[in-house]
């Protein structure tokens, strides 16, 4: 059974930091591109950050310079370090694993991030 489990979400004040983790099982982790998506109330789901099997990363413009995605293949885990958080970062954050040579992908159930004073 494929399983992606996000953790690390919660309530944080503006300007604060949070680190999300996504632990994967049931896949050959090192063969998958990993990504973080988010969906805020009333908005479409958007890609936040992704990291390839080769370790290169990309980010949506709104988080560049504030968020960092990384992966630890030995632990089958991908991380999203979020700094200088803003209220507009409030969303449910989802972990995604994608087979890079096709459309096969898997999703976690999400973790809530709330940025509020």
Image (cartoon, rainbow, N blue to C red):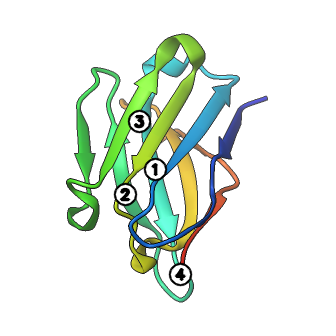
In the rendered image, the residue lying farthest to the top is 74
Quarter of the image for residue 26 reads: top right
Q: Residue 36 carries which label?
A: 1
- Which mark is in front, 2 or 4? 4
Kindly identify which residue carries mark 3.
102
Single out the mark in the foreground, 3 or 1.
1
Residue 57, position in %: x, y? 25, 38
Q: Residue at left 43%, top 71%?
A: 89
Quadrant in the picture for residue 76? top right
Pointer 4: residues within 10 angstroms few (<14), some, or many (20+)? Answer: few
Which one is closest to the eye, mark 4 or mark 3?
Answer: 4
| In this view, 33 is above or below 13 | above
Q: Which of 87 and 96 is in front in this view?
A: 87
Measuring 59% from the left and 38% from the top, which residue is drawn there?
Answer: 22
Q: Circle 2 is placed at which residue position? A: 48
List the residue tagged with mark 4: 117
């Amino acid at each position: 059974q494929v399983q992606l489990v996000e953790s690390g979400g919660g309530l944080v004040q503006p300007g604060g930091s949070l680190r999300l983790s996504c632990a994967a099982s049931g896949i050959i982790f090192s063969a998958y591109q990993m990504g973080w998506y988010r969906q805020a109330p009333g908005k479409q789901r958007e890609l936040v950050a992704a990291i390839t099997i080769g370790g290169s990363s990309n980010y949506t413009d709104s988080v560049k310079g504030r968020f960092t995605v990384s992966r630890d293949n030995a632990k089958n885990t991908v991380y999203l370090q979020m700094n200088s958080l803003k209220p507009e970062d409030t969303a449910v954050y989802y972990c995604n694993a994608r087979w890079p040579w096709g459309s096969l992908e898997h999703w976690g159930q999400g973790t809530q991030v709330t940025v509020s004073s």
